[in-house]
Image (tube, rainbow, N blue to C red):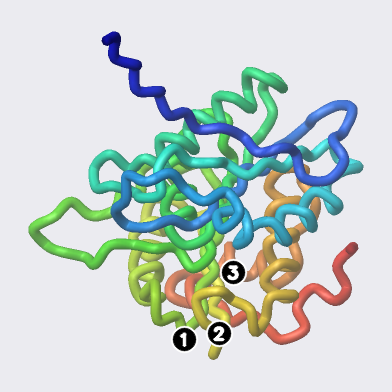
Amino acid sequence: MAHQATPVRRARLGRALGPEPTTVSGAVLLLPGCDETSARRPSALLATASVHTLGRRLARAGYGEGLITHVVHYRYRGWNGSEAHPAQDTAWAADEIVRRHGDVPVCLVGVGMGGRAALHAAGHSAVVSALAMSPWLPEEDMAASPEPVKQLVGRRVLIVHGTNDERTDPELSFRLAARSKKANRDICRFEVHTDGHGLRQYRSEVHALAEDFVMGTLFGRHFSRPVEDALAAPPPIGLRMPLAAGFGRSLRK
């Protein structure tokens, strides 16, 4: 009896969130969180839940500029060590954006392990910026290779982390940002005081901050004063910038 070949798993782009612009001038790739190790298929529903609301907000905010927004569906549910499957899938997704829409700027927006994927894949030639929210990062070990930062040079980078995050250590994202700042001045980090991993307590402010950063890096809109100050400030000030309650109330919805 003939053996059936095991189907090859492929990453894919989800359907564009919101109305698709006639002419695409920029793209956001939304990168959900995932497990540290797992060869199982991701649950599409659970994966998109963490980024769907933000993605729709960004799609609305950038529609007039020609923004298209997609969720990246990974091949596997885990990062899986040196395989770094979500980072590979993110690079594929950036290639796919270029194939479909030409040489348009791309912003990577990731949550949890997706934040790690955004930082790893930021070196892709189409990527101009990366936003990592509550990024999962490994414990620093002197015997192991540190998380790479060279790929962030020439990109604008924003990290957002809740100070009460019990799933991903905010101190690790601060240390990564501090190392990155030595080679790339265009990086800043906001702390959401008393908020946890899901950044639910100040979700409105976090989403407004994300919109401010994404629209500024993709389409040249002026950053809000807090973002400008955070990018310009030397460490540690610009890497421990508090996100003020009520941030974004005056931003365009």
Q: What residue type is labelled 3?
A: Ala
- Judging from the image, what secondary structure is the residue with disc 3 in? helix
Q: In which quarter of the image is residue 178?
A: bottom left
The residue under label 2 is 195
Q: Which amino acid does label 2 sit on?
A: Asp
> Which numbered dot is residue 4?
none
Q: Quadrant of the C terminus?
A: bottom right
Q: Nearer the observer, disc 3 or disc 1?
A: 1
Rendered location of residue 226, percent (x, y): 68, 72
Q: Nearer the observer, disc 3 or disc 2?
A: 2
The residue under label 1 is 164
Question: Which residue, as the protein is rendered here, is positioned at the far left?
Answer: 143
- Judging from the image, what secondary structure is the residue with disc 2 in? loop
Label 1 Cα crowd, 10 Å radius (few <14 / some 14-19 / many 20+): some
Name the residue rendered at 45%, 40% in the picture. 121
For marks 2 and 1, the one nearer the N-term is: 1
Q: Which amino acid does label 1 sit on?
A: Asn
Rendered location of residue 35, percent (x, y): 37, 57
Q: Where is 107 relative to 203, above or below?
A: above
The residue under label 3 is 230
- Circles 2 and 1: CB distance less than 8 Å? yes
Q: Quadrant of residue 219?
A: top right
Name the residue rendered at 62%, 35% in the picture. 13
* Residue 126 located left or right of residue 92: right
